[in-house]
Amino acid sequence: MDYQLVTFKLDEEEFGVDILKVQEIIRTVEITVVPKMPGYMEGVINLRGKVIPVVNLRTRFNKPTTEQNNNTRIVVVNLNNITLGLLVDSVSEVLRLSEDVVEPPPPIMEGGMDTEYIQSVGRLEDRLLILLDLEKVFGDDGVLSFV
């Protein structure tokens, strides 16, 4: 089985998500802050007449926030029929990984990210790619119930 992924960066770490969950990738637009939302919720955007909540993945993964720049993107994903925007530092590429270069995550990952969010780790020539399980990233503590 091959994995087809959209890859993006947060700091120097590279992550991948299943391309079938990605609806589109857009440049950042004005994000409207919504009161009383969890800290990782940036707010909402208007995407062609549809209101989409946006999650800052840096905040979600307890990383320090940075200023948005020309590389910052919103990866629009569909999870359990809910459309959600993921604010990321940059989008790298779309790639295909074969099963033989993908392995389960080690029990303890550097950087403090909860390994339950990690589906697997892909070994590329000169880098590692963390494959995220988006349902676990957003389902466990009710993030999807906010949208």
Image (tube, rainbow, N blue to C red):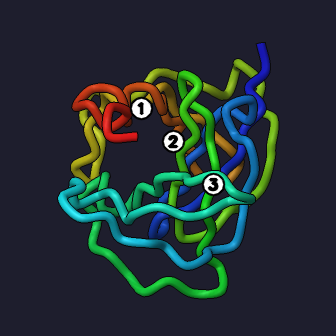
Q: Above or below — where is 27 with respect to 53? A: below
Task: Estimate the spatial distance between the alpha carbons at disc 3 and disc 2, rounded to whole Å.
Answer: 16 Å
Residue for badge 1:
118
Splitting the image into 4 quarters, where does residue 126 fall?
bottom right
Residue for badge 2:
130
Q: Tell me the element at label 3.
A: strand
Location of the N terminus (image quadrant): top right
Splitting the image into 4 quarters, where does residue 116 fall?
top left
Sequence-first tag of 2 and 1? 1
Residue for badge 3:
75
Q: Tell me the element at label 2.
A: strand
Name the residue: 74% across, 26% down: 3
Task: Tell me if 134 is positioned left or right of 102 in this view.
Answer: left
Three-letter amino acid code of the residue under disc 2: Ile
Name the residue: 69% across, 72% down: 27
Q: How crowded is mark 3: few (under 14 residues within 10 Å), some or many (20 or more)?
A: many
Tell whether label 1 touches label 2 (CB within 8 Å). yes
Q: How crowded is mark 2: few (under 14 residues within 10 Å), some or many (20 or more)?
A: many
Task: Estimate the spatial distance between the alpha carbons at disc 2 and disc 1, rounded to whole Å.
Answer: 7 Å
Q: How crowded is mark 1: few (under 14 residues within 10 Å), some or many (20 or more)?
A: many
* Residue most extreme to the top: 1
Name the residue: 65% across, 86% down: 70
Task: Tell me if 129 is positioned left or right of 125 in this view.
Answer: left
Q: Where is residue 47 in the image (x, y as percent from the top left)?
A: 68, 59
